[in-house]
Amino acid sequence: MKPLIALTIGDFNGVGPEVVLRAIAEPDINAICRPVLVGPIEIWQETANSYIPAANLVQIDDPKLLDDDYSGIPVLHIDGYTIKDLSPGRPSRKGGLAAVDAVKLSLDVCQQEHVHAMVTSPVSKESINLAGHSYVGHTDMLMDFTNTESVTMMMVAGSFRVGLVTIHVPIKSVADAITEREFMLKTKTAINSLKNDFNIIDPRVAILGLNPHAGESGLLGDEEKEIITPTIKRLAKEDYVVEGPFPADGFFGAKLHHNFDLVMAMYHDQGLIPLKLEGFEFGVNFTAGLPVIRTSPDHGTAYNIVGRGIANLSSITEAIKLAVSIAHNRASKSKSKVNKK
């Protein structure tokens, strides 16, 4: 059965509505899932008029009816927004409010199992802040809404996967943010996700050092000696296959990431720069550790190209495909547990 995938509108002043509608019109996406749009139907329709005018958007007021057979595209409508609220290419309070509302509704229908996964469209941190929220992105928003203690932001570009120990932390604060407990939690969360969500039975994980040359035996920093290496040893004692800490420059220079199922990076740019060099157009953001499946394209609102129809669809289509794949993997494991009982 094709899973139902909720697709949020994101910041409606950005390219989110456009890339979602263009992507779900693609035959290969229609072949693998049943898309459900989440957001103000009037704004979805305005966007559809420009890109897929033949689209038949159908407002669904009761999520329980999503399993019914529709000739059109179901929309979980959010009240309070009209096309008069649009300000294409610019952040706005309304754009931020709608983005958060769409995430809340998508999360709700995921948790109630009316849909199988959610794909979130790009949001603007500025718009979210204008709307009165302090979130810096989807990850902390979803952690808050689900009361989840720890998640791991995992970036995926094909078989190249990077997990982050710290995410949106200023460089001057990174070292203090890396604790043995946090490092352990995020690494375990990522590894368990590889097993459950990616069907990798015995994942191999590379751990990067924080400092140049992985600290050079303490000469260039002691985080490796005091935190990273002891944690790696603890993980190994618990039968996790982890290696490191590797100096990041030599590790990626020698393309050693191809030998591992996951690379755990200590901070944002350490892991994301090499991943984006290899898979900039088709990278996907996946949040490991949430009670629901959530993926997102690895790009922003792209205000500068809104309305031009030139936004690349590779990342959003890969985000949908990954959500579908994980939904099937989780369903298969769930079915297997039931059969064993």
Image (cartoon, rainbow, N blue to C red):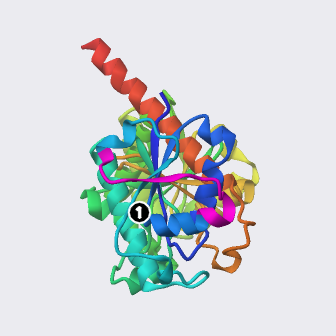
Total labels: the figure holds 1
Q: Residue 226 occupies which quadrant of the picture?
A: bottom left
Q: Is residue 32 left or right of residue 77?
A: right
Left-right relation of 302 to 137: right
Q: Is residue 94 magenta?
A: no
Q: Is residue 170 visible?
A: yes
- Give the residue at x 39% y 36%: 68
Residue at image x 58%, y 57%? Answer: 20
The quarter in which the C terminus is drawn is top left
Q: Is residue 51 magenta?
A: yes
Give amino acid for label 1: Thr
Decide if residue 1 is on the left or right side of residue 158: left
Query: Residue 40: horizontal and vertical position, in percent?
Result: 43, 67
Residue at numbered disc 1: 139
Nearest to the observer: residue 318 or residue 277: 318
Q: Position of residue 222 (x, y in %)?
A: 47, 66
- Crowd band around label 1 with a 10 angstrom C-alpha radius: few (<14), some (14–19), many (20+): some
Q: What is the magenta range?
A: 48-63
